[in-house]
């Protein structure tokens, strides 16, 4: 039996895509990509799982925070073929990466479905970029975008009458009024967009570029640390927590990374982790100074700050 594999972000558009296929009595399987830098509409996996279970559809998770997908994903960030947005976000390469993986699960006349809306995201959802994605993933005619289908070339499942084109939509642009109206009509509950892709944030880029340049065996815990604390580099990396919550996060992540660590005992202050033992005197000095409110003394470390 032909089935539709839905690239499921968990957000409103992908939920609508699932519903539109179910209304045509098409067997559904969903694929959720867990990405190391976020980027999905719903980064809460429990929410994604619950919705799939409620809809009675199989959920397949592609965990790109772990090997072997992590290494492949980091490679497209290092060397994007089709450029980036305003920061380090290789949106077109990222889409192609996901489609190529999803393609591996297609059988026979199966086809892919996404909640993409024509023109909604200028870096990846203009018509020429949708065509680029299909070409580079060798999926011409096998990607159905039901929310904008009537504005796009007819796909193979429509030609074969597996999908009724007349029941598909013609939504375009960044406004979500039509999607919200449809969600209300179909009684679809959905989460508000959260987080977003860290690769789009300009302040995040220097820390990511630094670790991509200086470390070959990057773990997901290294990536999680990029969003925590103050980051410095002399011989190697030194990271200081900014508050109690960050201190606790650093301690937990370091159980995997096993860097050298300084935990304050006598007076409150930052937890410090450092990779190179030669940086120990500097790390100890930083720990002492950043335990105070002496702003001027802290400036002496600016030359090591990653920014």
Image (cartoon, rainbow, N blue to C red):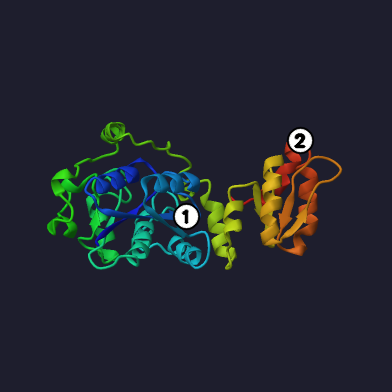
Image coordinates for residue 92, horizontal then vertical, percent: 34, 56
Q: Is residue 29 above or below residue 289?
A: below
State the separation of the CA atoms marked 1 and 2: 37 Å
The residue nearer to you, when weighing 30 against 220, is 30
Image coordinates for residue 181, horizontal then vertical, percent: 27, 31
The residue nearer to you, when weighing 207 against 198, is 198
- Look at mark 2 in the image and give the residue it sits on: 293
Residue at the location (44% across, 50% down)?
87
* Secondary structure of residue under mark 2: loop
Residue at the location (61% across, 52% down)?
225
Q: Can you tell which quarter of the image residue 95 is in?
A: bottom left
Q: Is residue 243 visible?
A: no
The crowd level at tag 2 (other Cα within 10 Å; few <14, some 14-19, many 20+) is few
Q: Classify the position of the N terminus by image quarter.
A: bottom left
The residue nearer to you, when weighing 178 against 233, is 178
| First-in-chain label (1 vs 2) | 1
- Look at mark 1 in the image and give the residue it sits on: 35
Image coordinates for residue 231, horizontal then vertical, percent: 64, 51
Residue at the location (53% across, 46% down)?
203
Image coordinates for residue 96, horizontal then vertical, percent: 34, 61
Q: Is residue 73 visible?
A: yes
């Amino acid at each position: 039996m032909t089935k539709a594999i839905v690239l499921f972000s968990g957000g409103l558009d992908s939920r609508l895509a699932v519903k539109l296929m179910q209304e045509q009595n098409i067997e559904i399987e969903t694929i959720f990509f867990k990405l190391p830098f976020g980027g999905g509409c719903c980064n809460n996996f429990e929410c994604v799982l619950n919705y799939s279970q409620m809809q009675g559809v199989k959920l397949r998770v592609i965990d790109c925070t772990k090997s072997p997908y992590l290494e492949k994903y980091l490679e497209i960030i290092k060397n994007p073929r089709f450029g980036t947005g305003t920061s380090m976000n290789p949106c077109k390469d990222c889409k192609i990466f996901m489609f190529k993986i999803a393609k591996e699960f297609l059988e026979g006349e199966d086809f892919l479905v996404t909640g993409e809306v024509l023109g909604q995201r200028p870096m990846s959802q203009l018509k020429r970029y949708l065509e680029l994605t299909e070409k580079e993933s060798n999926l011409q005619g096998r990607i159905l975008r039901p929310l904008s289908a009537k504005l796009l070339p007819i796909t193979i499942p429509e030609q074969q009458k597996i999908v009724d084109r007349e029941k598909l939509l013609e939504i375009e642009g960044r406004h979500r009024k039509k999607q919200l109206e449809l969600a209300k009509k179909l009684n679809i509950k959905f989460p508000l967009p959260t987080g977003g892709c860290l690769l789009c944030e300009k302040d995040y880029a220097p820390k990511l570029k630094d670790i991509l340049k200086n470390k070959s065996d990057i773990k997901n815990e290294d990536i999680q640390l990029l969003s925590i604390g103050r980051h410095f580099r002399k011989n190697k990396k030194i990271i200081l927590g900014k508050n109690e919550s960050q201190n606790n996060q650093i301690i937990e992540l370091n159980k995997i990374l096993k860097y050298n660590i300084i935990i304050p005992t006598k007076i409150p202050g930052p937890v410090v982790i450092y990779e190179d033992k030669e940086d120990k005197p500097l790390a100890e000095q930083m720990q002492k100074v950043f335990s105070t409110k002496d702003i001027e003394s802290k400036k002496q470390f600016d030359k090591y700050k990653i920014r």
